[in-house]
Amino acid sequence: MTILYYKIIIFVLCFVSSSFGANVLIIFSQPAKSHYILGNGLATGLAKRGFNVTIVSPFEEKHPPENYHQIVLDGVVEKMEENLIKGNFNVFEFGDTSPMLQSLILNTMSTEFANQFFAHQKVQNLLKSEEHFDVVVIEQFLNDATKIFAHHFKAPLIIASSLGPNIWVNDLVANPEPPAYVPNVFLNFNDEMGFTERLYNFLFGIFCQLNTHFVVYPTQSKILKKYYPIGPDLDGIIYNVSLVFLNSHESINEPVPIVPNMVHIGGYHVTPPKKLPKDLQHFLDNSKEGAIYFSLGSNVIPSQMPNATRDAILKVLGSRKEKILWKWDQDSLPNQPPNFKLSKWFPQQDLLAHPNIKLFITHCGLLSTTETIYHGVPILGFPVFGDQKLNAARAATLGIGKFIDFSKINENNLEEALNEVLDNPKYLQNAKYRSQLMHDRPVKPMDLAAYWVDYVIRHKGAPHLRVAGVKLPLYKYLMLDVLAAIFASIFTLFYLVYRIVKYCRAPSVKEKQH
C-alpha cells in the first residue's frame, strides 16, 4: 500500500469518528413529492454515513436505512389535494399567470402549509419533547417560522434550498444577486439580458424584496407567535444561518456569486442506475430507432392539460419513428398511438441511463433537469410554472435542448423543435459535455454535504463563515443612507449655485432707480 492510500484511510476514519452518532433533525415540510425527494435523499445519505437522522415530512420512506427515524405528518398531503379539488386548481392555468401574481399565490399557499405544519400534533409533540439535536436542517421555501426548531433545540441551523441561489435564501446570508446578470427565479431570462429584460428583472426584484419584508416575514412572524408564543421574534432567528445547501452545480447553473457559507451540492439525490423492470427493459432494448421519455414531474396532473394541446402532442409524437414512454395519470389515452407506452410512474433515473433514450420531454423541474444532465440526455422543455421557465431558458442557453411554453404548444412548433433537437448532433454533444462537468468533481456531492454538516457541528455553527452584511439592516446593506446623503449634497450644491447666480444677476439698487 502506498503512503497516499494510508493518508486517505486516516482521513476517512477521522471524518467518520467525528461525525458518527451526531443527531440531525431534517425538516422538509412542503407537501410536494419533488421537495421530499431532496429531503429524503439528504436524510438517507447522512444516515448511511453514520449520522443519527430524524426527518419530519408529509411523506414516508418505505425502506429506511439504519439511523433513520421518521416523523410522518399524516393527513397533510390529503388535505392539500382536497383543497385543490375544491378550488378547481389546474396547474396549467396557473402557469399563464404573471410572475407577480404567482408569487402572491405562493404567499397564500405557504401560509396555509405553515399553519397546517405547526398545528399538526406530531410537530407539537416534537416541540414538547426532550430530544437533543446537534444540528437542524430546514428546507427554505417561504416557511421561515420553522427556523424556531434550531432555537428550540439550541442547535446550529442549516437551510437547504431546492434551487440554486435565489430570492428566498440570498437575503438570509447577505448573498449578492446583481440584477444585471442574475435572473429572478420566476423569469425565463438567461444571464445575457437586454435592456428591457434587465429593467424588468430589476423592478421585479424590488417587488420581491417588498413582498418578502412586508408580507412574507410579517405573516410568518404571526404564525410563529401563535404556535410558539414564548420564543424570540422572527428577526432574531431567521438570519442565524450557519450554512446553506444549494441544489445547484456549475454544470447546470450559471456561475454567480456565493458567500462562504453557501455550498453547491446539486445532484446529491441522483443514485447509480438500477436494473429496469423486465417490461421496460424489453421495451427499450427493442426500440431500434430509439425512445423518447415524456414526463411532467410529480406535481402536475397530465390529464388536466387542454384537449387541444394533448391532441397536438399525440399526433406529432404518434407519427415519430421512436417509441414513446409517457408518464400519464390514467390507464389510457384517447386515440393512443401504437408506439406509446403509458405508466403512472416510471423509474426516471434508471430510464435516463438506458442508451436508447434519445430525448427527455420534461416540464424542466430542477430535479428532472439535473438527472437528464447527469445522464447526458438532451431535452425538449414544456415549462409550466415557477422556476421551470428559468430552468428551460438555462437549458437552451447551455445548448442541451429547446423549450416551448406549455400554453404555446402546437403541431408545427412541436414538430420543428423535435426535429431540431433529435437531428442536430450539437444538443447531444452539449448534453454529454455537461454530464462530464457534473461528474468531474473532487468529492461526491453527498460526501460534501456530510462533511459540511459535520463541520458545522464541530465548529459550533461556524460563525466565522458568515459575512458582515447579514448583520446590517436593509437600508444599510443597499447603501440607501449613503445614496440619500449623496443626493442631498448634490441637491444642496445645485441649490446654492442657483441662489448665487440669481443673486449675482439681480439688478443693484442704483440700477433699479434709473
Image (cartoon, rainbow, N blue to C red):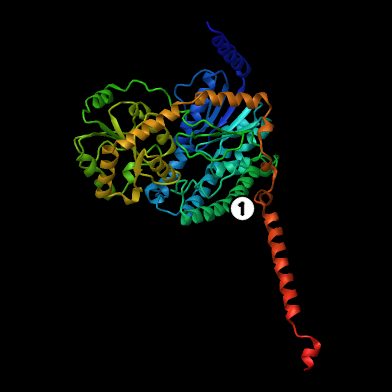
**Crowding at label 1, few (<14), some or many (≥20) Cα neighbours within 10 Å?**
few
Q: Viewer-proximal residue, 164 or 102? A: 164
Query: From where the camera sits, is residue 470 visible?
Result: yes
Q: Residue 155's x, y, as percent?
A: 66, 29
Q: Residue at left 50%, top 50%?
A: 103
Q: How many marks?
A: 1
Instruction: Single out the residue that lies furthest toward the bottom.
Output: 514
Query: From where the camera sits, is residue 371 visible?
Result: no
Q: Quadrant of residue 244?
A: top right
Q: Viewer-proximal residue, 370 or 34? A: 370
Q: Quadrant of residue 396?
A: top left
Instruction: Single out the residue that lies furthest toward the right.
Output: 509
Taking the image as shown, residue 60 lies to the left or right of residue 399, namely right
Q: Residue at left 36%, top 38%?
A: 400
Q: Which residue type does callout 1 highlight?
A: Phe
Residue that carries the numbered disc 1 in the rendered image: 214
Q: Viewer-proximal residue, 369 or 29? A: 369
Helix, strand or loop for disc 1: helix
Q: Quadrant of the C terminus?
A: bottom right
Q: Residue at left 61%, top 19%?
A: 19
On screen, 210 above or below 382? Answer: below
On screen, 31 above or below 19? Answer: below
Q: Residue 250's x, y, as percent?
A: 48, 34
Q: Residue 304's x, y, as percent?
A: 33, 46
Q: Residue 435's x, y, as percent?
A: 40, 30
On screen, 280 above or below 116? Answer: above
Taking the image as shown, residue 198 lies to the left or right of residue 509, namely left
Taking the image as shown, residue 352 lies to the left or right of residue 269, namely left
